[in-house]
Image (cartoon, rainbow, N blue to C red):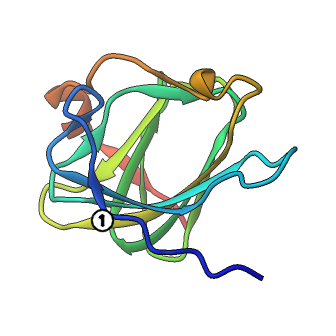
Amino acid sequence: MQVVPRPATTKNPPDKFTGDVWLDPIASPRDEGQRMTVAKVRFAPGARTAWHSHALGQTLYITQGVAWIQSRGGQKVTAHPGQTIYCPPGEEHWHGATPDAFMEHLAMLDNADDPATTTTWLEHVSDDEYAATGQEIS
C-alpha cells in the first residue's frame, strides 16, 4: 500500500475552458500497463470545457451541483449528483456548470498508447450552444 501525497489544485487553462475551472488529480498510471486517470473537476457557474474528444472515451460522475453535457450534433443533457455520463471514444462533446450554480464531477478516462493523443481539444463552445435548451436525464 502507498499513501499518495495530495497534489495541488490547478486552475485549468483558458484555451481549453470558458470560465473558472479547477482540477484535483486523484489517480494516474503508476505501473506498467496502467492507463486510468481520475480527477475531481470543479466548475464555477457558467464555466465549461471547450469541445473535445477522448481517444478511449470518458466517464463523468456528477458529485455536486447540476451539469450540462452535450455531444456534437446531440441535445444538451442535464445531469445531477449521483448520475454517470459516458462519452464513447472519439465522440466530440463538452461539459460544464449551469449559469447559476457550481458543479463538480469526477472525470475518468484511460490514456491512449501515446498519452499526448488521449484528449483532442477543439474550439470553444459558443454562448448560443451553451444556452440552447436540453433535456433532463434520470
Q: Image quadrant for the C terminus?
A: bottom right
Residue wearing tag 1:
103
Q: Nearer the viewer, residue 29 or 70?
A: 29
Q: Where 136 falls versus 125 (above or below)? A: below
Q: Position of residue 104 (x, y in %)?
A: 36, 66
Q: Which type of secondary structure does the marked residue at label 1 adopt? A: strand
- Residue 130's image quarter? top left
Q: Residues within 10 Å of mark 1 (few under 14, many from 20)?
A: many
Q: Position of residue 114 (x, y in %)?
A: 70, 23
In the image, 102: left or right of 114?
Answer: left
Residue occupying the point 44% across, 38% down: 70
Q: Where 63 falls versus 107 (above or below)? A: below
- Residue 98's image quarter? bottom left
Q: Nearer the viewer, residue 45 or 10?
A: 10
Residue occupying the point 64% across, 29% down: 115
Mark 1: which amino acid?
Met
Q: Image quadrant for the N terminus?
A: bottom right
Q: Position of residue 134 (x, y in %)?
A: 36, 45
Count the marks: how many? 1
In the image, 82: left or right of 47?
Answer: right
Q: Where 108 falls versus 14 (above or below)? A: below
Residue occupying the point 85% across, 46% down: 32
Q: Where 35 falls versus 94 (above or below)? A: below
Give the residue at the far right of this rendering: 33
Q: Position of residue 61 (x, y in %)?
A: 54, 64
